Amino acid sequence: MRTIVHLSDLHFGRVDQDLLRPLQELVVKLAPDVVVVSGDLTQRAKTEEFKAARAWLDTLPGPQIVVPGNHDIPLYNVASRFLTPLRKYLRYVTLDLAPEYVDDEIAVLGINTARSLTFKDGRVNQEQLAQMRQRMQSVGPEHTRIIVTHHPFDLPDTFDKDDLVDRAPMAMQAFAECGVDVLLAGHLHASHAGNSAQRYKISGYAALVVQAGTATSTRGRGESNSFNVLRVAPDDVQVERYSWVEGTRSFEPVHTECFRRSGDVWSLAAES
């Protein structure tokens, strides 16, 4: 079994400073095999925000799979936005826009969905999917295959389909062909877990889709700051949501869902 801590939407520049140390200490205590950060490390892609995000990430255990979000592209600096949109991200966070972590049980692959031509939406392209296919060819059938993006491929019922990553159906077909098991994303500041069967009618295939809320931003959009812990076994994934509880001034486990695989279909087995 492998443990993954899934953080998202840190938004340095608009963080609740009181959450940083308790979250860092808890992540260390959880002793994850890999830490995933699914984008929006900063609020406005400023140098000081990236430096603060980098310094905080350095206090977390590794390895880490980090991908950029739309907020990690400059908004008001038009020249930088269109000519060098991820320059600061590449300098302060990582040069790798397609990070991966592979061990004997899991394969975690990051895909960059952030684009400069749109203010908040994301996109995948054929080149990225071809690279994903090539990387998956070296992964054995015993691995649980996990994709990390900022923008989501599925949504809670309360969200509009415009919030989906562009070209999602094309990507989902590629994921089905490669046997991708789990999709991790952020962007919405809303926690969610379910399978892709209702939105994508792909015969014999349904990925587990896990959405993280915002871990540290002051813009919670009605949901407490939260993050996910995934415990991944070959045919089972437990998704546990930790939320900030003001009364205890700590992140506490508040909801757990267990998903089971049958063939290439993931479905809810139990929740508490």
Image (tube, rainbow, N blue to C red):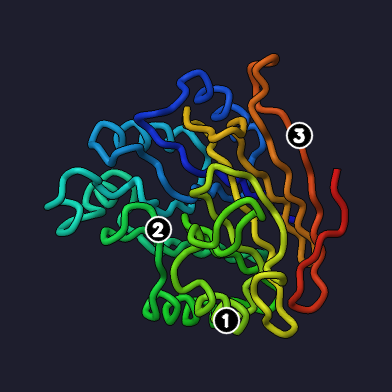
| Contact between labelled residues 3 and 2, with CB atoms less than 8 Å apart | no
According to the image, label 2 marks what residue? Answer: 121
* Quarter of the image that includes the C terminus: top right
According to the image, label 3 marks what residue? Answer: 254
Single out the residue that lies furthest toward the left.
Answer: 79
Amino acid residing under circle 1: Gln
**First-in-chain label (2 vs 3):** 2
- Quarter occupied by residue 42: top left
The span from disc 1 to disc 3 (Cα, nearest Å) is: 33 Å
Amino acid residing under circle 3: Val
- Quarter occupied by residue 23: top right
* Quarter of the image that includes the N terminus: bottom right
Position of residue 174 in the picture relative to residue 268 (left or right): left
The span from disc 2 to disc 3 (Cα, nearest Å) is: 30 Å
- Front residue of this view, candidates 131 and 212: 212
Count the marks: 3
Is residue 102 in sight in this rendering?
A: no
Q: Secondary structure at mark 2?
A: loop
Q: Position of residue 110 (x, y in %)?
A: 47, 62
Q: Position of residue 207 (x, y in %)?
A: 68, 69
According to the image, label 1 marks what residue? Answer: 173
Amino acid residing under circle 2: Asp
Position of residue 232 in the picture relative to residue 91 (left or right): right
Residue drawn where x is 42% and y is 54% of the image: 67
Label 1 packing within 10 angstroms: few (<14), some (14-19), many (20+): some
Q: Secondary structure at mark 3?
A: strand
